[in-house]
Amino acid sequence: MILTRLIALAGLSVAPALADTWTDHFTLEALPNPAGIDPQVGALAALPDGKLAAAFHRGEVMIYDPAGKSWSLFASGLQEPLGMLPQADGSLLVMQRAELTRLVDADKDGKAERYETFFDGFGMTGNYHEFAYGPVRDKDGSLFIVLGAASNGAPIRPEVRGEFSKIGQADFNQMKDGKNWKENSKLAGRMYSRVPYRGWVIKLSADGRTSEPWASGFRSPNGIGFDARGRLLVTDNQGDWRPTSPLYEIKKDGFYGHPASLIWRKDWDGRDPMKISADELDRMQTPAVGYMPQGELANSPTEPVIIPDGAFPKEFDRQTLIGEMNQPWLVRVLDDEVSGQLQTALVPFLDGSPLGIGNNRLAFGKDGSLYVGKTALSWAGSFGITRVKWNGKPFFSIAGVKATQSGFTVTFSEPVDPSTTGGVSAKRHTYKYHANYGSPKIDETKLPAKATLSGDGRTLTLDLDGPLKEKYLHLLDLSALRSKSGNSLLGAKAWYQVNKAP
């Protein structure tokens, strides 16, 4: 106290305390990579005994023991595994490119002896882009997988699995002929679905014996998962018919925007989807519940997972977290519901931390640790697994965002300093739905944002001077806010997609 007074008397100012950073609250630790393995992660799963199962790009499935920080080989020889789900009997379901495989360790020696085909009821052309993702399990025990479409970046193989559809401007011979692919590729469409059920979510019975095509319209859906309320979520990547990367809530028989897969609908009328107008397709599609602006929030979103109670501060309990390949953070999902329709605010998580890029697969361990599996393949990315552990210290964060008739209410984990609310800003824009790759922002507009703080300082009401505009993505920039204790927000921007205005 005496020293402070002396400094003040000398005409000097006392520097304010430094604002919190992510590393004040989280420890980020790189796990040791298994020896002799290409450490690009295609799947992660926490096991009941506290260990971690990881599937790597070259086909190994390995088990990590956090106690001993050691790896052991469980299975090998798999083809590009991109999903994994532990079963109650101790077996693992792993999604290979060509099938969903059940790995069985019958003698309990830590290695799988049996590799059983659990489900392979979908087509393949051999095109390099025919990825397969999942499975995830609903509360009734049913399983869901999602299949990516093929790309005209390469032709197909002379042999295909499943029916080859005749709907399309390029016939089978043109598509398998690599010599003339440059001109024929334009006939195929940028992304195509000429065998069943590329670009579809498929529902499977618990034993894999029966299947049902569930929803269509996907391009490169590198993320499937359930939220805490049992809603099935899928992320997709920006591209043709994708103005920017979307987040979808999946409903039976829904169409989610990419037309190539429509030819496999039971009631399809035989038209070539490439010849249907964007306006007609737009009327058919189920809108995204969230959008991630390219280069700002996400370029390549990945797996959605539920944040378990106690893993992070209580404001995060049972919320959804999404991986992201090209940006050095994850994406947090804040739910809202208007007239029974889900829509979301999306917020960066661990932005400005040492997390880095390539964040392909997520899994929460038994102790609440978040494991982040990284990959690169031929795109931007990284390698290995990072363990993220909260130290129990609360921090200043957005707790929720809700739409109102003329704006939004934003709740916070700590009281807001009222002197900082004048710096809050808002914008909105929409996108063009078309066959081109991505879309620029359309009708981007700055909005007046009158901010009113509640008596307890934890709720900020933003009046945007007029009714909310449907089909627009609204950016709420809260970077100027400080808590009463002087800290800045960790995750200070929220992108809210308004499909239904209150």
Image: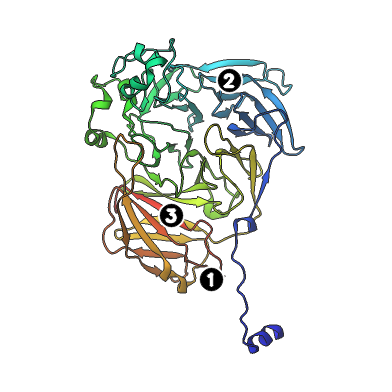
Circle 3 residues within 10 Å: few <14, some 14–19, many ≥20: many
Q: Within the image, what quadrant is residue 264 found in?
A: top left
Q: CA distance from mark 3 to mark 2?
A: 40 Å
Q: CA distance from mark 3 to mark 1?
A: 21 Å
Q: Residue furthest right?
A: 68
Q: Is residue 254 left or right of residue 292?
A: left
- Seen at 42% across and 68% down, the residue is 423
Q: Nearer the viewer, residue 129 or 109?
A: 129
Q: Position of residue 294 (x, y in %)?
A: 42, 45
Q: Is residue 387 left or right of residue 473?
A: right
Among the two numbered marks 2 and 1 on one chain, the one whose residue lies closer to the N terminus: 2
Q: Within the image, what quadrant is residue 272 found in?
A: top left
Q: Position of residue 494 (x, y in %)?
A: 43, 54
Residue 256 in the image: above or below residue 387: above
Residue 168 in the image: above or below residue 84: above
Among the two numbered marks 3 and 2 on one chain, the one whose residue lies closer to the N terminus: 2
Q: Secondary structure at mark 2?
A: strand
Report the quarter where the C terminus lies: bottom left
Q: Which residue is mark 3?
A: 494
Q: Which residue is mark 2?
A: 102
Q: CA distance from mark 2 to mark 1?
A: 53 Å
**Residue 297, label in figure:** none
Q: Secondary structure at mark 3?
A: strand
Report the quarter where the N terminus lies: bottom right
Q: Secondary structure at mark 1?
A: loop
Q: Which residue is mark 1?
A: 484
